[in-house]
């Protein structure tokens, strides 16, 4: 018989072999006709047998196994547990986590195993159902558990040759208390009267071994005048006194022990334990820990089962390919941290975050061996592109004269990730002093707190349209002021931003350059036919149109954004949801008191290779008397194509867009779209029809990727007219 300590060493090897998909373990070169004695496992080798679906599970099934508490060391209790485990009706465990299907297959429900890492749960929920982790698609969180029982046998085909063809006159199972063998005889393929065959003996060994509760199954064949008697000598697995997990950090030991559900005082069932270990491995895969697995199982002399787990710790994160960008700018975007178990969900999300910085044409990761077998190094390979821009330009007109333009921008200042932009206009008849200076520092601390500011002083030409798209006025608007923004990352996909701003809008009429209604007095210029530009219809001066629509606005704006898009520049999956609330005046000073609320949702679904369905919906309202510049506007390339820019305006707004995007040739894609929306109720704009309406358009367009960003060309057909729209940047 196999010595106790020797068996325990062998068990650690055999169970691990089962997890790797091997068959039953057998020993060779032992004579038949007597019970073999083995003092070493050196001769143990794996038999090339098929993996069978387990038909017996936990001996701890309360409905089938009487309690052995208080007598768990007795031979009787061991034998009783063995017989109970060998029954074919115990395929369903007491806790319901091991279930045998009608086809005989066994599944293990591991949904009870969960990680307390909220970040992993959030990321996996967003990224689940992708090619990254097929296990995440299983809503039942079940693992296939076709686990092979582990046992040894001394028989070899060579030793069976003298008995082949002889008649079996008796069958028995020994090593248990008399009278208990009847429960096990049903697992034998051979019957009295059958001829001895190699296949039949091996099948009987396998049938008994696959109960999972025997460490040894050896045939003892005795020649008698009528033929042979076959007795199968069995040895029980040890009695479990306790379970101890080692190396686990993702799942708590208490959770794992409860999940394993092996009660002290019961005989170890290798099939049942193997099934549960399969469930543990599948749970790690399900939750993104693709390198984690059970690496060892052993039983010590005190009956304690030791289960070792290797989780694959990230030893280091090493950027490569970055010449300008500092390493910390890349590594700070990684939510997969050093010293933590490798998680494929977190790594992929980290790669998305690095790409969304906008500094790189491509981002990839390589997994390299660490300094120990259980450690890995993540190498982040990036391909940088130029992030700085310099624009020099000039223009001339009779009204403005010669104007020079200088613009400097850098999205990755000195490789720190800081953003700076300077726009300056000089010259002109009015000696232009147009400028805009902005700066953003994205990481004040390790929590991703950002600080930004902007100073601006600009004068631009504006055109006002009525609700039918007819031009009513051209004039200049001068705006100056500044804002300061403080942002904070409040979750993996959420960010809150608080902005303090003061701005002053001034109306300017320029003779020879302005036309249409003149808002500062009761006279106009230009126009003909039905257009009465003499202001006879509207008394702008007495109405104080300029005072009600131009002036200083002091405000505080809070915005919350949830953004799970995989690529903010060209998303193919995920969503972006934002809520914005603006407090203007009401104790902050300025000329206007109002509240402004806006909500927006964007969703993306990948339909195929390069094919994407994109949807955006937004709405908002204003309480109080907001100036003209703060009203909601719709119309143009970014909201309602097929209509004039800002054709619709008011205190209330709704807008929705549906786009189907598809590739055409390299760097060129097409889009089919439909837009709907309206803005209404502009009480301080007398020439605008403020009634609520419904405006829609359909159209098609092209997108061309260039070094300076995407170029958009859209053709939209609206309710009354059609228009081409040419612009830079992404649609949404």
Image: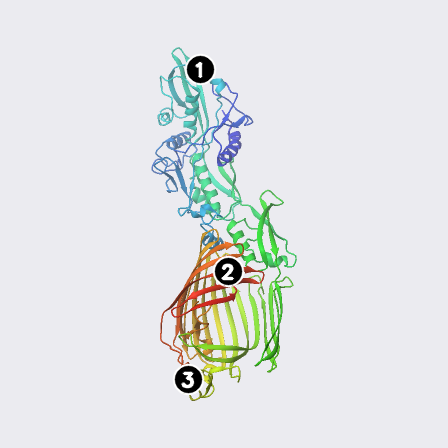
Q: Is residue 712 depicted above or below 197 in this figure?
A: below
For the residues bearing labels 1 and 2, Cβ distance under 8 angstroms: no
From the top left corner, tell me how far across and down residue 122 is, in percent: 46, 55
Q: Residue furthest front?
A: 529
**Depth order, front residue of 70/383:** 383
The CA span between labels 3 and 1 is: 118 Å
Residue 217 appears in the rendering: yes
CA neighbours of label 3 inside 10 A, class few (<14), some (14 to 19), many (20+): some
Question: Residue tagged by mark 1?
Answer: 163
For the residues bearing labels 3 and 2, Cβ distance under 8 angstroms: no
Say how the picture is coloured. rainbow
**Depth order, front residue of 500/548:** 548
**Within the image, what quadrant is residue 335 found in?**
bottom right
The CA span between labels 1 and 2 is: 81 Å
CA neighbours of label 1 inside 10 A, class few (<14), some (14 to 19), many (20+): many
Numbered mark located on residue 532 in the image? 3
From the top left corner, tell me how far across and down residue 693 is, in percent: 36, 72
Residue 101 relative to residue 396: left or right: left
Whichever of labels 3 and 1 marks the residue nearer the N terminus, that label is 1
From the top left corner, tell me how far across and down residue 638 is, in percent: 47, 67
Numbered mark located on residue 336 in the image? none
Q: Is residue 3 depicted above or below 260 in this figure?
A: above
Secondary structure at badge 2 equals strand
**Depth order, front residue of 132/480:** 480
Secondary structure at badge 1 equals helix
Please tell me which residue is depicted at 54% across the width and 70% down the height of the picture: 485
Secondary structure at badge 3 equals loop
Numbered mark located on residue 703 in the image? 2
Residue 269 appears in the rendering: no
CA neighbours of label 2 inside 10 A, class few (<14), some (14 to 19), many (20+): many
Q: Is residue 612 depicted above or below 640 in this figure?
A: above
For the residues bearing labels 3 and 1, Cβ distance under 8 angstroms: no
């Amino acid at each position: 018989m196999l010595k106790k300590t020797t068996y325990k060493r062998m068990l650690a090897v055999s169970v691990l072999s089962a997890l790797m998909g091997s068959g039953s373990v057998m020993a060779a070169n032992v004579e038949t006709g007597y019970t073999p004695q083995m003092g070493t496992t050196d001769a143990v080798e794996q038999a090339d047998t098929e993996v069978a679906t387990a038909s017996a599970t936990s001996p701890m099934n309360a409905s089938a196994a009487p309690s052995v508490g208080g007598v768990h060391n007795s031979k009787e209790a061991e034998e009783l547990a063995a017989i109970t485990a060998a029954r074919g009706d115990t395929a369903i465990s007491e806790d319901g986590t091991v279930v045998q299907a009608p086809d005989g297959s066994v599944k293990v429900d591991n949904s009870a195993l969960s990680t307390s890492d909220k970040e992993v749960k959030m990321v996996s929920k967003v990224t689940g159902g992708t090619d990254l982790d097929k296990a995440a698609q299983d809503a039942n969180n079940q693992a296939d558990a076709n686990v092979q029982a582990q046992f040894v046998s001394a028989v070899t085909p060579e030793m069976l040759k003298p008995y082949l063809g002889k008649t079996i006159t008796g069958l028995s199972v020994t090593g248990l208390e008399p009278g208990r063998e009847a429960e096990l005889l049903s697992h034998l393929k051979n019957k009295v009267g059958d001829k001895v065959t190699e296949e039949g003996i091996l099948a009987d060994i396998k049938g008994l071994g696959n109960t999972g509760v025997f460490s040894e199954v050896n045939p003892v064949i005795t020649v008698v005048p009528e033929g042979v008697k076959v007795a199968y000598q069995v040895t029980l697995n040890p009695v479990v006194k306790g379970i101890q997990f080692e190396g686990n950090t993702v799942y708590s030991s208490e959770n794992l022990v409860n999940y394993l559900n092996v009660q002290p005082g019961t005989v170890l069932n290798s099939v049942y334990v193997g099934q549960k270990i399969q469930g543990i491995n599948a749970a790690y895969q399900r939750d993104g820990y693709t390198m984690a697995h059970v690496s060892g199982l052993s039983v010590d002399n005190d009956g304690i089962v030791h289960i070792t787990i290797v989780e694959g710790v990230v030893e280091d994160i090493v950027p490569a390919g970055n010449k300008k960008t500092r390493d910390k700018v890349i590594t700070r975007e990684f939510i997969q941290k050093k010293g933590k178990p490798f998680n494929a969900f977190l790594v992929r999300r980290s790669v998305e975050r690095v790409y969304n910085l906008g500094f790189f044409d491509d981002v990839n990761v390589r997994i390299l061996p660490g300094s120990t077998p259980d450690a890995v190094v993540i190498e982040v390979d990036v391909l940088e592109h130029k992030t700085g821009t310099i624009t020099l330009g000039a223009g001339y007109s009779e009204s403005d004269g010669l104007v020079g333009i200088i613009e400097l921008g850098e999205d990755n200042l000195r490789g720190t990730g800081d953003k700076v932009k300077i726009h300056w206009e000089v010259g002109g008849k009015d000696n232009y002093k147009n400028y805009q200076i902005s700066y953003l520092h994205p990481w004040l601390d390790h929590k991703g707190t950002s600080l930004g500011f902007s100073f601006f002083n600009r004068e631009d030409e504006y055109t006002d349209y009525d609700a039918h798209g007819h031009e009513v006025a051209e004039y200049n608007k001068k705006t100056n002021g500044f804002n300061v923004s403080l942002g904070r990352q409040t979750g993996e996909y959420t960010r809150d931003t608080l902005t303090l701003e003061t701005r002053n809008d001034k109306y300017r009429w320029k003779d020879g350059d302005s036309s249409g209604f003149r808002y500062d007095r009761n006279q106009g210029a230009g126009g003909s036919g039905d257009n009465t530009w003499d202001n006879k219809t509207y008394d702008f001066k007495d109405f104080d149109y300029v005072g009600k629509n131009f002036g200083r606005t002091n405000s505080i704006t809070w915005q919350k954004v949830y953004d799970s898009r995989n690529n903010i520049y060209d998303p193919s999956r995920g969503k972006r949801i934002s809520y914005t609330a603006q407090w203007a005046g009401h104790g902050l000073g300025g000329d206007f008191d109002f509240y402004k609320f806006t909500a927006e949702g964007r969703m993306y679904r990948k339909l195929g290779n390069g094919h994407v369905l994109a949807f955006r919906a937004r709405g908002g309202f204003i309480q109080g008397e907001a100036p003209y510049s703060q009203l909601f506007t719709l119309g143009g390339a970014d909201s309602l194509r097929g209509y004039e820019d800002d054709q619709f305006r008011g205190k209330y707004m709704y807008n929705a867009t549906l786009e189907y995007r598809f590739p055409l040739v390299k760097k060129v894609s097409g889009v089919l779209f439909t837009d709907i929306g309206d803005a209404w109720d502009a009480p301080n704009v007398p020439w605008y029809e403020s009634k609520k309406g419904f405006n829609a358009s359909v159209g098609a367009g092209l997108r061309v990727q260039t070094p300076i960003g995407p170029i958009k060309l859209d053709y939209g057909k609206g309710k009354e007219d059609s228009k081409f729209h040419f612009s830079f940047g992404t649609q949404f």
